[in-house]
Amino acid sequence: MNMSESSILCKMIDKSWQPLFDQYDFDLDDIYTGEVYPPREQVFRVFEMPVHKIRIVLLGQDPYHGPNQAHGLSFSVPTGTSIPPSLLNIYKELKRCFPDRNYEFPSGNLEEWFYREKIFLCNTSLTVEKGKAGSHMEIWKDFTDEVIQFIDKHNPSCVFLLLGNFAKSKSSLITKKNRIVTEVHPSPLARGFVGSGVFERVEKVLGSPVNWSIEEEDLSDKLSRMNLGSPKNLTKMDEDIDETLCNKLQNLTLDPTKKVIYLDCDPAVCGQSKIAVTLDYSQPKPIEQKPKPKRTRLQQMCEEPQTIGEEAVKIYVEYSKENNLPIKVEDINDILTSM
């Protein structure tokens, strides 16, 4: 692995994982001999997520070993790729568990589960040779066992979803047994997954609902259609964030049916491949028989945006809150005067 690639991969990995990664020295040049999946720039993709933000760990075995399938997230495939049979069964069970939510699953791309719902989609083997299932299990076993223990130690509130006997065998690494949900594998070759109620149990243990929906349009395609480009300076430096975000919003046509958009980022600059921006279009509920408290101008813009500039301010505020950044009056004025 050359120094440039090493630098990029290190920046993709959230700093919360650093104590774990400091114990290992992976040589991807040794691993990527012949045709190996996923692409090497996606091998550590799942570690973009800070360990303390994980809500659910969905443990897979190893990546899909066919072309154009694996992209660094367990059970997930890129949009446009045929949905694998196991994932189809997962979708069937979700629809059966939550018929009132009217879920539709037009693709097998689970990026929204990862970025929006904080579902840690990790395989116990991070790579695989083409056409050879399980071929790299021994390479990654010790490391991914420690990943499970690291999460167990540093995130006591997350739920471990273990599907199939292989995943269940990892329960011995988890000390908080009451945070484990197990079920048979969703493969059509296994019986009993559809009808098991496993996702209802997950939400019960988690203590909150999960939005399992999948957007019909691929997020990267959506952003490309909006001419947003790649926000290469986003999160590079605090002082660059607001200006860069504002520039990316100038041509943005906001869709009130979308709650979250994802901006593609250069991992070498941002440290991750996508930035999630939450859009909240909800109107404040009227307070019966009580006068509404006086709202500041900023609150008015965020609750009832009237212009593109105010929409930009709203997203700037949401982004700043999500990333624990200061909200500066001068930055808001700059956004409003630039649109």
Image (tube, rainbow, N blue to C red):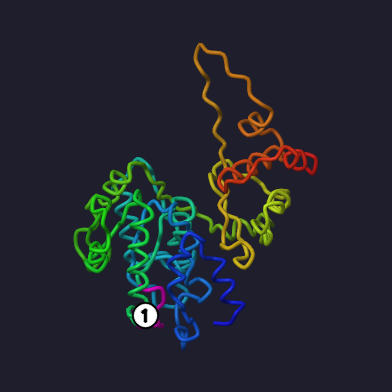
> Would residue 127 appear left or right of 240 to someone viewing this image?
left
Q: Main secondary structure of the magenta part?
A: loop
As for residue 172 lying within the magenta part, the answer is: no
Q: Which residues are magenta?
A: 125-133
- Residue at point 63%, 41% (across, down): 317
- Residue at point 53%, 20% (across, down): 286
Horizontal and vertical percent position of residue 201: 26, 47
Horizontal and vertical percent position of residue 279: 57, 42
As for residue 128 lying within the magenta part, the answer is: yes
> Would residue 95 appear left or right of 110 to someone viewing this image?
left
Q: Amino acid at mark 1?
A: Ile
Q: To which residue does mark 1 refer?
A: 139
Q: Choose between 280 and 53: the one closer to the eye.
A: 53
SS at mark 1 in the image: helix
Horizontal and vertical percent position of residue 283: 56, 29
| Residue located farthest toward the left when viewing the structure as drawn | 191
* Quadrant the C terminus occupies: top right
> Would residue 28 appear left or right of 194 to someone viewing this image?
right
Q: Choose between 234 and 131: the one closer to the eye.
A: 234
Give above or below for 324 relative to 80.
above
Q: Choose between 315 and 94: the one closer to the eye.
A: 315
Give above or below for 76 relative to 281.
below
- Residue at point 35%, 70% (across, down): 124
- Residue at point 72%, 39% (across, down): 332
